[in-house]
Image: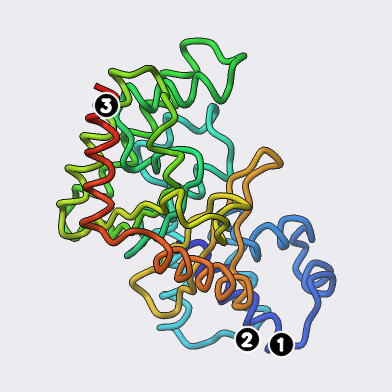
């Protein structure tokens, strides 16, 4: 999140200086590809690179310079994520970092229980089923990463999660009956937490706006940090931050909230499905 904020500031400073990336590259000796990666929050700039950019953009105010340099220093990855750097896609580690700093998460899932609410056995079955060529080591490391993400719901000032699922999620026997019954029980219990809302879109609704696929919308404590949409698909992972895209998915989520059962009736349906499985 801090890296994203720094990138936005540097883009703004370059634009205010009426310079193209190519011109900045020529005049500072900073590789244009590196400059692009800095401005798109792909990499954290080295101190000397950042100082060179601030000099070029005419930033002389010491408070502003120190603030941006400190922002760069603080743009570190979550400590536990470093152990997974070689095993998780860059987009997924970026998502985890955003999620850890988010104030709220609105998540719609049409196929699985949301990752933040998955039990260990359910997560293991999901990952093994979704990646059939994966070996046991890969599966276990992904399960470990998924469970560590759930710390966001347990910390002081926890993440506010609003999770909506298609009813199909409740009936799909991921991992078998025992695993699924335990998962549904955990889901019903999670919905009792004051910072977690769980809703189910019932089959009776028919066609609804969530049918094209799952997505997540994150909002952040700082007003300077715009909402972010995340989509995970077989074609790859995608982040959307344009106002028009965020508004579009926000409207879709609001329609899903209206179409879904209220939280009390959703919890009742979850328990009913679990009882029938038993």
For marks 1 and 2, give the one nearer the viewer.
Answer: 1
Report which residue position mark 2 lands on. Answer: 58
State if disc 2 and disc 1 touch (CB < 8 Å): yes
| N-terminal label among 1 and 3 | 1
- Front-most of residues 110 and 95: 110
Q: Distance between the residues labelled 3 and 2?
A: 62 Å
Whether residue 133 sits left or right of residue 136 in the image: it is right
The numbered dot on residue 17 is 1
- Front-most of residues 103 and 10: 103
The image quadrant that residue 45 belongs to is bottom right
Q: Distance between the residues labelled 1 and 2?
A: 8 Å
Whether residue 38 sits left or right of residue 137 in the image: it is right
State if disc 2 and disc 3 touch (CB < 8 Å): no
Determine the secondary structure under disc 3: helix
- Front-most of residues 191 and 209: 209
The image quadrant that residue 78 belongs to is top left
Residue at image coords 63%, 86% = 58
Task: Please rate how many residues cluster around mark 2, counting C-alpha atoms within 10 Å: few if below 14, some from 14 to 19, many from 20.
Answer: few
> Which quadrant: the C terminus?
top left
Task: Please rate how many residues cluster around mark 1, counting C-alpha atoms within 10 Å: few if below 14, some from 14 to 19, many from 20.
Answer: few
Report which residue position mark 3 lands on. Answer: 181
Q: How far apart are marks 1 and 3 (CA)?
A: 60 Å
């Amino acid at each position: 999140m801090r890296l994203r904020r720094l990138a936005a500031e540097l883009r703004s400073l370059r634009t205010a200086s009426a310079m193209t990336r190519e011109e900045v590259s020529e005049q500072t000796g900073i590789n244009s590809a590196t400059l692009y990666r800095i401005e798109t929050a792909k990499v954290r700039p080295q101190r000397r690179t950042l100082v060179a950019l601030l000099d070029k953009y005419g930033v002389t105010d010491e408070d502003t310079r120190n603030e941006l340099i400190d922002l760069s220093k603080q743009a570190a990855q979550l400590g536990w994520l470093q152990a997974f750097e070689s095993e998780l896609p860059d987009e997924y580690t970026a998502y985890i970092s955003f999620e850890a700093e988010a104030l709220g998460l609105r998540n719609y899932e049409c196929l699985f229980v949301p990752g933040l609410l998955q039990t260990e056995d359910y997560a293991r079955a999901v990952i093994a089923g979704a990646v059939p060529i994966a070996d046991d080591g890969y599966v276990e490391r992904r399960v470990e990463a998924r469970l560590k993400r759930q710390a966001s719901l347990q910390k002081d000032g926890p993440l506010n999660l609003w999770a909506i699922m298609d009813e199909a999620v409740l009936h799909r026997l991921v991992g078998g009956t025992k695993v699924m019954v335990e998962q549904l029980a955990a889901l019903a219990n999670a919905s009792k937490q004051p910072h977690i809302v769980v809703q189910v879109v019932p089959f009776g609704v028919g066609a609804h706006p969530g049918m094209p696929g799952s997505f997540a919308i994150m909002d952040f404590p700082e007003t300077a940090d715009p909402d972010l949409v995340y989509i995970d698909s077989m074609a790859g992972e995608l982040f959307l931050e344009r106002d028009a895209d965020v508004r579009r998915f926000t409207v879709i989520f609001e329609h899903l909230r209206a179409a879904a059962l209220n939280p009390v009736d959703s919890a009742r349906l979850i328990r009913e499905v679990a009882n029938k499985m038993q």
